[in-house]
Image (cartoon, rainbow, N blue to C red):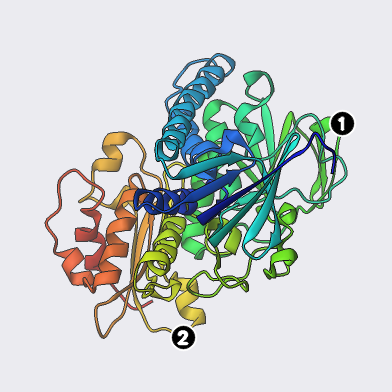
Amino acid sequence: MDDSTKHLNLEADLLVIGWGKAGKTLARDLASAGKRVVLVERDDSMAGGTCINVACVPTKTLVNLAERRGEQAPDEYLPKAIASRDALIDKLRAANHAMLASLETVTLVSGEARFIGPHEVRVQAGSETLDISAEAVVINTGTSPAMPDIPGINGESVYDSTTIQHIAGGRVPPSLTIIGGGFIGLEFASMFAAFGSAVRILERGSTFLPALDDDVREAVVTTLADRGIEIVTDAPVSAIEDDGRQVVCGAGTFETDAVLVAVGRKPETAALDLPAAGIETNERGFIVVDDQLRTSADGVWAVGDVNGGPQFTYVSLDDYRIVKDQLVGDSHRSRADRKAIPTTTFITPPLAQVGLSEREATAQAVTYLVASKPVAQIAAMPRPKTLGETHGLIKVLVAPGTDEILGATIFSVDAQEVINLVALAMRNGVTASQLRDGIWTHPSTTEAFNEVLAGLHTP
């Protein structure tokens, strides 16, 4: 070792690698209880985690700002929208940093961690090498956009879901081609259509959004079409040419001003040297865990997106609860306890779902009743009309013998809020009849249940 290199050692009760939701909350709680905590983050701009810096919060901020553009010129409005996004994220990042930096027993380390044993990592920062050992280790390194091996994918006008949030020059591309027909691509499609782009989505398969029920898919496609968004199926991309100005796919060759690659996310595990700690991963690189989020190395947990579970911040928060319960509780919490986890895709209006879809119920031979109605036809729910957004539908599946709610799709304004009510009902045995006969505020989206659930029928 060079004489100029400093080799330091640090011991802790808890080592957290990565500044995501679960990890930072564990760090805060254990440090507040007097435990020695070290948190290592390789990218200072990610303090607070993926959600607040490049995912949930900034993208939903941009979706909201896009919808408020009105008649403002796209190229004048987008830089202001990006500046507003950045100002908010700067505040949230600073608040997250202060949350841990203010605790006496927390040490924050900037650098990339690499395992040199099950409970020890090495962090190289310039001329300093820091070895950190801890009784408990939590891996919280998250995911990043996956970029497939396509010729030309590194073109100047090709973006991923992070980089497009600061698109070159802050200019709205007159045309935007999105590779990938999943939910990430949908959100950006809706966003950039509102910012003023002509948006095209390329779906490699023969069916767009194949997991959705046919009527839900039709409602989504109609909504996107009304916003000028083109959907092309059977379009696997073979090349991107002219620095992202041309996309070659199974359905033909398309001229475009910019390309967004939105084909999913990959785990950030490559730099960790997980084999050195005896930590197993699956074929996609996600860390293998049991229902208490324990890895194959004793005393090491993996939380958040990196463990291959549902990639949602609120699931990461539940991961925190499960691990905390093992570190300072009675170890009773488990992923097996989870029931009725809702999801929302923030197109306009939002598409929210929980429980079984009709397609899933049929595949599982589950007997059900169904109630479904287009939003524009729900007389008892005038709120969408007051907001000028009547796209969508509301659909609920109910068990015929017990009146139990089996699942729901809320494709409507306020869907991201209303779906939580349905999930709560499912977790606590509230029946469809109780939702149908509930007394709800007016005008609200919730009162749709009064009318929609009155139409339950056999499919």
Which residue is the site of mark 2? 365
Q: Is residue 215 left or right of residue 188?
A: left
Residue farthest left in this picture: 439
Which amino acid, mark 1? Asp
Per the rendering, the mark at residue 242 is: 1
Q: Secondary structure at mark 2?
A: loop
On the image, the x and y values in percent for residue 388 come to: 34, 35
Which amino acid, mark 2? Ala
Figure quadrant of residue 167: top right
Figure quadrant of residue 385: top left
Q: Secondary structure at mark 1?
A: helix
On the image, the x and y values in percent for residue 383 come to: 25, 42
Q: Say which of 56 and 130 sits in front.
A: 130
Quarter of the picture holding the C terminus: bottom left
Q: Is residue 88 left or right of residue 399?
A: right
Residue 132 visible? The answer is yes
Q: Say which of 216 and 146 sits in front.
A: 146
Per the rendering, the mark at residue 341 is: none
Q: Is residue 302 above or below residue 257?
A: below
Q: Say which of 280 and 85 sits in front.
A: 280
Crowdedness near tag 2: few (<14), some (14–19) or many (≥20) residues, C-alpha within 10 Å? few
Q: In the image, what residue occupies the spot 58% across and 33% down?
A: 45
On the image, the x and y values in percent for residue 234 come to: 74, 56
